[in-house]
Image (spheres, grey):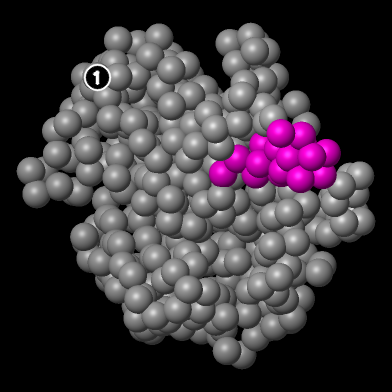
Amino acid sequence: MISPGGKRIVVTGYGAVSALGRSVPETWASVREGRGGIAIRTIGGGEYGPPSQDAPVAQIVDGYQAGLDAHFGPQTAAALDPFARMALAASLEALQMAGLVGASVLDEQTAVVVGHGLVGLETLEKGYERFYGMRSPRLHPATIPKVMISAAASAVAMAFQIHGPVFATSSACASSAHAIAQGAGLIASGQVRAAIVGGSEAVATPGSLRSWEAIHALSATTCRPFSADRDGMVLGEGGAVMIIEDFEHARARGATILGELIGVGMTSDAFHITQPALAGPVRAMRAAMTQAGALDAETVLISAHGTGTPLNDLTESQAIREVFGERAASHPVIATKSAHGHLLGGAAALQAIIGLVALHEGLAPPILNYTTPDPACAGIDLVLGESRAIDTKLLLQNAFAFGGLNVSLAFTTA
């Protein structure tokens, strides 16, 4: 139960596009079977930039916008930066699944809250190449509309005629988790009956790659969450969106209930711009599980933030042990960034969707690329090797961002 007033927040649809597939079923098939979307790609090498480089990235799968073009015509996607295009593609799938495309509820009674960490990078880099490299005094007239952080939320609202609250959230790698929490708050307060929530990211660009390299955050090989030889994260692209509704509204219209949001924890470390602190994640996880009434649950599927960076994985494993104590070893831990890379602002929504499907299927997907146990990360139950049968209806989704911004979300499919 999320609100003091007793409103229940349920999931009635979801959509996703990423390096793993053009839909949630394609994405789930990939993670279930242990297929990853990370590959060495050649990035950059244009006339006005530095030489190209080969690097591991998880680029969006080809053909993901075919559904958009079929539904809206090619002009809609063409007018958007990739980050907004990916959010719109995921929203279309989610709304179709929820049976809400064209429904009258998509008016004042629906909100759109979409989160991103870095936006409009393809548009900006092409514009700067034109401005600084070609020394052109003119930029494309659509530059500002394409790079607004609210461009994706506005595109979704316009595409589906949504007149309720529409805005973006930006809190680095916790952006889509905050978006889910904010959408739930709007429903719990009675302002809307439904919300389109999630996030997207399109960061596999030359400038982005060089920027992340400059802070030594990227792996030279691949993403290895919790493995002793982990050496950094891998940038990923994609979009992921959930449809959440007031339970009574969803039941009245005969919607299929895919899950329920039963706990939210949001905290700040107030410590360091890039280094995590233990207390913040502990408080976020404990708050979500306490609100869910599941702190002492026998088994919980934990979808870890799991970036594959040395400090993040160490801190997260410590936090899991501190929150759950001796029961930490009873909760299976998955880390799907090892398959789809780090979508930054869109990561939490994608991982939560995968986690909900995992609960329905009774199957936890494996952590990929793991090679060597890290004694410092011991005491938690990592799902390794292949998918594992699980018997739980509880999911804890973690999102821990630069700046010490932490969100944990608790879901159930019971």
- Would residue 329 appear left or right of 162 to someone viewing this image? right
Q: Is residue 214 above or below residue 14?
A: below
Does any portion of residue 229 appear in the rendered image? yes
At label 1, the amino acid type is Glu
Q: Residue at x 74, y 48 (%)?
A: 205
Tell me residue 218's x, y (percent).
Answer: 71, 68
Question: Which is nearer the eye, 40 or 351?
Answer: 40
Q: Main secondary structure of the magenta part?
A: helix
Task: Identify the magenta region.
Answer: 119-137
Judging by the rendered image, the residue that carries numbered circle 1 is 108
Q: Quadrant of residue 216?
A: bottom right
- Would residue 244 appear left or right of 213 to someone viewing this image? left
Q: Residue at x 27, y 55 (%)?
A: 263
Placement of the C terminus among the 4 image quadrants: top left
Q: Residue at x 64, y 9 (%)?
A: 73
Tell me residue 197's x, y (percent).
Answer: 40, 37
Within 10 angstroms of label 1, few (less than 14), some, or many (20 or more) residues? some
Tell me residue 191's x, y (percent).
Answer: 17, 31
Q: Residue at x 30, y 19 (%)?
A: 163
Specify whether residue 115 is painted magenta.
no
Question: Which is nearer the eye, 210 or 264?
Answer: 210
